[in-house]
Image (cartoon, grey):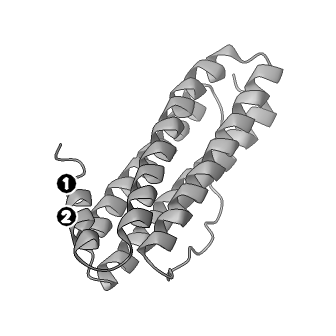
């Protein structure tokens, strides 16, 4: 059974994961408005992943005899200065999610909740991947710039996410 402290922390993480999904859908809408369908596709794929992460936490709380209690989601930003600024926000957001997962893990260690520690290892590994992916795209954008043929080539590359 989850302690009340961990149940509360897991519920907060569920909200963060669903906010992430909401944020990525907003980023997809921005990308579509900028005529960057590949960027939009990448963001929609990311949105689906985040919903999956939220549901993984949801299922875990229930499996451990806890009670899921959902909170309100904040309104995500809708406008971004450029594609580079968009991915700077993606990377910063993923870093904040990583910090949140790490704090959850610290709580599980403090409470000697070994099952939660094992479950959270998957998320720790996932966050390494998430940050690396966002960082790679951001570095490419910084090299290529926010306009021109290079941006269109990156847009086409991002459109292939999920089909590789």
Nearer to us in this view, 116 or 59: 116
In the rendered image, the vertical position of residue 12 relative to residue 121, given as above or below:
below
The x, y position of residue 68, in whole percent, is: 62, 44
Quarter of the image where the N terminus is located: top right
Q: Quadrant of residue 104?
A: top right
In the rendered image, the vertical position of residue 112 relative to residue 125, given as above or below:
above
Of tags 2 and 1, the one toward the viewer is: 2
Mark 1: few, some, or many residues within 10 Å (few <14, many ≥20)?
A: few
Q: Quadrant of residue 120?
A: top right
The x, y position of residue 54, in whole percent, is: 51, 46
**Residue shown at 59%/57% (left/top)?**
93
Q: Are marks 2 and 1 in contact (CB under 8 Å)?
A: yes
> Which residue is the site of mark 1?
160
Mark 2: few, some, or many residues within 10 Å (few <14, many ≥20)?
A: some
Q: CA distance from mark 2 to mark 1?
A: 7 Å
**Left or right of 18: which side holds 150?**
left
- Dot 2 lies on which element? helix
The x, y position of residue 73, in whole percent, is: 61, 66
**Left or right of 115: which side holds 78?**
left
Quarter of the image where the C terminus is located: top left
**Left or right of 46: which side holds 97?**
right
Q: Is residue 159 visible?
A: yes
Q: Is residue 68 visible?
A: no
- Dot 1 lies on which element? loop
In the rendered image, the vertical position of residue 69 relative to residue 26, given as above or below:
above
The x, y position of residue 71, in whole percent, is: 66, 59
Circle number at residue 127:
none
Circle number at residue 156:
2
Nearer to us in this view, 76 or 82: 82
Nearer to us in this view, 148 or 1: 148
């Amino acid at each position: 059974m989850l302690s009340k402290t961990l149940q509360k922390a897991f519920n907060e993480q569920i909200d963060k994961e669903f906010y992430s999904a909401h944020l990525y859908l907003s980023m997809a809408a921005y990308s579509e408005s900028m005529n960057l369908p590949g960027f939009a596709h990448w963001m929609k794929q990311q949105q689906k992943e985040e919903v999956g992460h939220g549901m993984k936490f949801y299922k875990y709380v229930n499996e451990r005899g806890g009670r899921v209690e959902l909170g309100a989601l904040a309104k995500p930003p809708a406008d971004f200065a450029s594609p580079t600024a968009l991915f700077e926000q993606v990377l910063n957001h993923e870093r904040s999610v990583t910090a949140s997962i790490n704090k959850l893990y610290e709580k599980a260690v403090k409470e000697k909740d070994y099952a939660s520690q094992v479950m959270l290892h998957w998320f720790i590994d996932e966050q390494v991947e998430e940050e690396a992916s966002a960082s790679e795209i951001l570095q490419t954008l910084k090299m290529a710039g926010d306009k021109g043929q290079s941006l269109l080539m990156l847009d086409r590359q991002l459109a292939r996410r999920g089909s590789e």
